[in-house]
Amino acid sequence: MAKDVQVAEHGSYSAKDYHDPPPAPLFDAVELGKWSFYRALIAEFIATLLFLYITVLTVMGYRSQTDPDKPGTNACDGVGISGIAWAFGGMIFVLVYCTAGISGGHINPAVTFGLFLARKVSLVRAVMYMVAQCLGAISGVGLVKAFNKAHFNKYGGGTNTLATGYSKGTGLGAEIIGTFVLVYTVFSATDPKRNARDSHVPVLAPLPIGFAVFMVHLATIPITGTGINPARSLGPAVIYNKDEAWDDQWIFWVGPFVGAAIAAFYHQFILRAGAAKALASFRSNPIV
């Protein structure tokens, strides 16, 4: 009997071995008076600035190294599409790892939107995070232009545009599915149930998130240049500020927000059975 009890204690898990954090309030004005809130905003701003600075420089470097009009260039030189994908995925891995304990390491308005829909962040925090992320993206691209204005203007400023031969519907679909993959990975990697049962999960969470960004870039760079992050698309568009940068900008906002919403619904109501739990609770407490 004692052995059976021991196995039950150490070899299995009950439904009560973890606790989901309570839903974030829709509007929490108290946050505005806390230094931790403003520290998180600074972290999101700096992280997004660094993200855009490194990744846009990588894109500019690739375009320069493969420019057919430059003497001595070779289309096989440079980092290539896989190198660009590694730059985006690697930076997300590093920055999420560095800022997760301060702000959650969102670095993406679409991710923030998905977490807000799942009630993991308040409306105040979600809106202010998005503002900080967009300002950080604009500042990061601004630094790229400041350091190398000639290359920045010549090679399109690292803007996201729909590639020739693809319809707007295809581009929108690529952004929706790509963002779904990213936000779904974020939810899965930070699931409190997994964190409670697998102590290594919080440490490794940035790795699958960064790898998801890498894989999505490999798939969608040829289609849209890969947005899946409205701030990433907005920053270059604002600084480059030419018609081609704005023509399809809506795709890089609508697609990521729709993809994030679908991912939030799928994780919360299908995988975590939120709808079933709510229905069971309703049935167990009938109105008399």
Image (spheres, grey):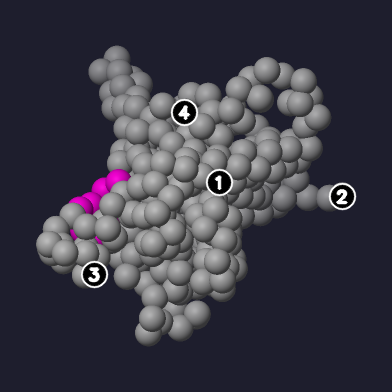
Say which of 60 and 178 sits in front.
60
User: Mark 2 = which residue?
Assistant: 288
Q: Give the CA separation, mark 1 to mark 2.
A: 57 Å
Q: Residue 169, can we see it? A: yes
In-image side of 104 versus 36 (left or right): left
Circle 4 sits in a helix, a strand or a loop, which is it?
Answer: helix
Q: Give the CA separation, mark 3 to mark 2.
A: 79 Å
Classify 256 as above or below 110: below
> Which one is earlier in the sequence, the residue at label 3 or at label 2?
3
Q: Give the CA separation, mark 3 to mark 4.
A: 41 Å
User: Mark 4 = which residue?
Assistant: 99
Image coordinates of residue 245 in percent, x first then y, are 52, 66
Q: Residue 14, can we see it? A: no
Q: Are the residues tagged 1 and 4 within 8 Å (C-beta)? A: no
> Which one is earlier in the sequence, the residue at label 3 or at label 1?
3
User: Mark 1 = which residue?
Assistant: 138
User: Mark 3 = which residue?
Assistant: 69
> Which one is earlier in the sequence, the residue at label 1 or at label 4?
4
Circle 2 packing at 10 Å, graded few (<14), some (14-19), many (20+), is: few
